[in-house]
Image (cartoon, helix red, strand yellow):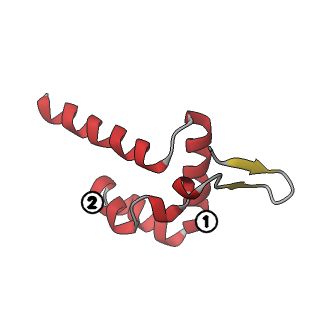
């Protein structure tokens, strides 16, 4: 189930265990995959980062691991160029 928006709290809420932060990679994964700026943003603005991830997952209809595999596919294609 994808994340849902709670209008009373004005926040995105994970819909299942696959949507929770523990299902994905941690801040070190952000550093390795995207560099220092996203890593620092993830540490300093952890709640904003998580809300952005949940919003993306809801709009695209995917979970954290699907998003990760799309990323790996992109890197693989980039290496072929």
Disc 1 target residue: 47
Residue ID at (33%, 68%): 28
Sequence-first disc among 2 and 1: 2
Q: Position of residue 58 (x, y in %)?
A: 62, 41
Q: How many marks?
A: 2
Q: In the current view of this chain or complex, which residue is farthest to the right? A: 8
Q: Position of residue 33 (x, y in %)?
A: 30, 54
Residue ID at (69%, 56%): 13
User: Label 1: few (<14), some or many (≥20) within 10 Å?
Assistant: few
Quadrant in the picture for the N terminus: top right
Q: Nearer the viewer, residue 42 or 24?
A: 24
Mark 2–mark 1 Cα distance, whole angstroms, equals: 20 Å
Look at the picture and state if 52 lies above or below 26: above
Q: In the current view of this chain or complex, which residue is farthest to the top? A: 81
Disc 2 target residue: 32
Q: Position of residue 35 (x, y in %)?
A: 31, 58
Quadrant of the image occupied by residue 16 = bottom right
Residue ID at (61%, 65%): 47
Under tag 2, what secondary structure? helix
Q: In the current view of this chain or complex, which residue is farthest to the left? A: 80
Q: Nearer the viewer, residue 30 or 12?
A: 12
Residue ID at (48%, 65%): 22
Q: Which mark is residue 17?
A: none
Look at the picture and state if 34 lies above or below 61: below
Quadrant in the picture for the C terminus: top left
């Amino acid at each position: 189930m994808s994340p849902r928006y709670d209008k009373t709290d004005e926040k995105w809420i994970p819909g299942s265990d696959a949507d929770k932060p523990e299902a994905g990679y941690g801040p070190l994964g952000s550093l390795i995959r995207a560099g220092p700026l996203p890593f620092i943003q993830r540490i300093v603005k952890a709640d904003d980062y998580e809300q952005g991830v949940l919003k993306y997952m809801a709009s695209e209809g995917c979970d954290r691991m699907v998003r990760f595999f799309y990323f790996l596919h992109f890197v693989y294609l980039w290496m072929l160029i």
